[in-house]
Image (cartoon, rainbow, N blue to C red):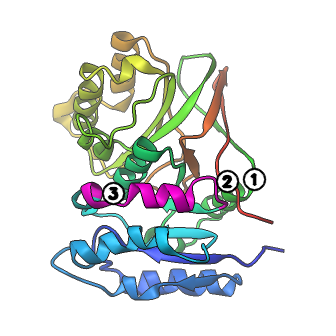
Amino acid sequence: MMISRSIRLISPSGYCHNQPAAQLGIERLQAAGHQVENQQVIARRFQRFAGTDAERLADINQLAALTTLPDIVLAVRGGYGASRLLESIDYTGLQRRLLNQPLALCGHSDFTAIQLALLAQVGLISFSAPMLTGNFGAATLSEFTQHHFWQAVTSPTVNVSWQSASPDQGEWQGTLWGGNLAMICSLIGTPWMPQIDNGILVIEDVNEHPFRIERMLIQLQQSGILARQRAIVAGSFTSSALSEYDNGFNFSTVWQRLRDTCGLPVISELDFGHAADTVTLPLGARARLQVSQGHAHLQATGHPVLRG
């Protein structure tokens, strides 16, 4: 039987244009026995954003002043807008209130910017995880996504296994980090980019053609970031249609070029990202990646775990 959890909604990015999906997500969570707080953020709107910069910033900074912490802080959706907030986040206050607490800060896509900024500034581990509207409010709720989400936030060890066509084999250990690739690249040269040595970099994206993905990876390479990593795990790259013009240029060729130019293993086909099925991963946790004969296994520890 699932334990009832308190879930606080935040909406630091785009306006929730699919209000019915958000309401469905709330209904599902409540039907499972969970309490969903701060629901008023769903209807907020200013231009294309889920409220003004000040309102969306308050979603984040108010966490530092909460007397009682929720179990889960859940982003409503992604879109765009998190980058506008990074300079004004109360990193010291959030570190004082949230570090080493049994709280799961969850989201992905545009939220990656805030997650990596928190990791860079104060070492706060968060979860690249499903969001209210696109995942919990999906027309068809993914059992795969649900299972991996609750397993990740309630277990001291996160285990993810999958089949990969990667030719790489071996074992690598390091800090698990990453998320949405476009958002990672947007932080290059800023104080919000974590300086990770011996990292296991996990990446995903949506609506990005393979050549755009390769261009972003070249930027990471030429910035010296890839040289400090142990391995790359490639998740879902959805809504990217190839054409005759590509003439065989696809994601597999992007991954192989990365292996050839950087000498890094690239382990692909992880269900992680904007697809219906997605695993939940703790960004900043200690990780071990093992690959043998097409079978990949990723294990992470050291992340916040909800109380039983």
Element carrying mark 2: helix
Q: Which quadrant of the view contains residue 1?
A: bottom right
> Does the rendering let one see residue 190?
yes
CB-based contact (under 8 Å), mark 1 and mark 2: yes
- SS at circle 3: helix
Q: Amino acid at mark 1?
A: Ser
Q: Residue at x 63, y 53 (%)?
A: 100
Find disc 2 in the rendering and name its residue: 152
* Amino acid type, label 3: Asp
Q: Position of residue 220 (x, y in %)?
A: 29, 27
Residue 259, image x, y percentages = 41, 15
**Residue at image mark 1:** 155
Q: Is residue 17 magenta?
A: no
Tag 1 or tag 3, which sits nearer the N-term? 3
Name the residue: 43% across, 73% down.
62
Q: Within 10 angstroms of label 2, few (less than 14), some, or many (20 or more) residues?
A: many
- Magenta part of the chain: 86-102
The residue beneath circle 3 is 110
- Residue at 23 percent across and 27 percent down: it is 219
On screen, residue 87 above or below 287 = below
Sort mark 1 into few (<14), some (14-19) or many (20+) by Cα contacts within 10 Å: some
Instruction: Relative to 104, say whether 71 is above or below.
Output: below
Q: Amino acid at mark 2?
A: Ala
User: Counting residues from the N terminus, which is met first, the one under dot 3 or under dot 2?
Assistant: 3
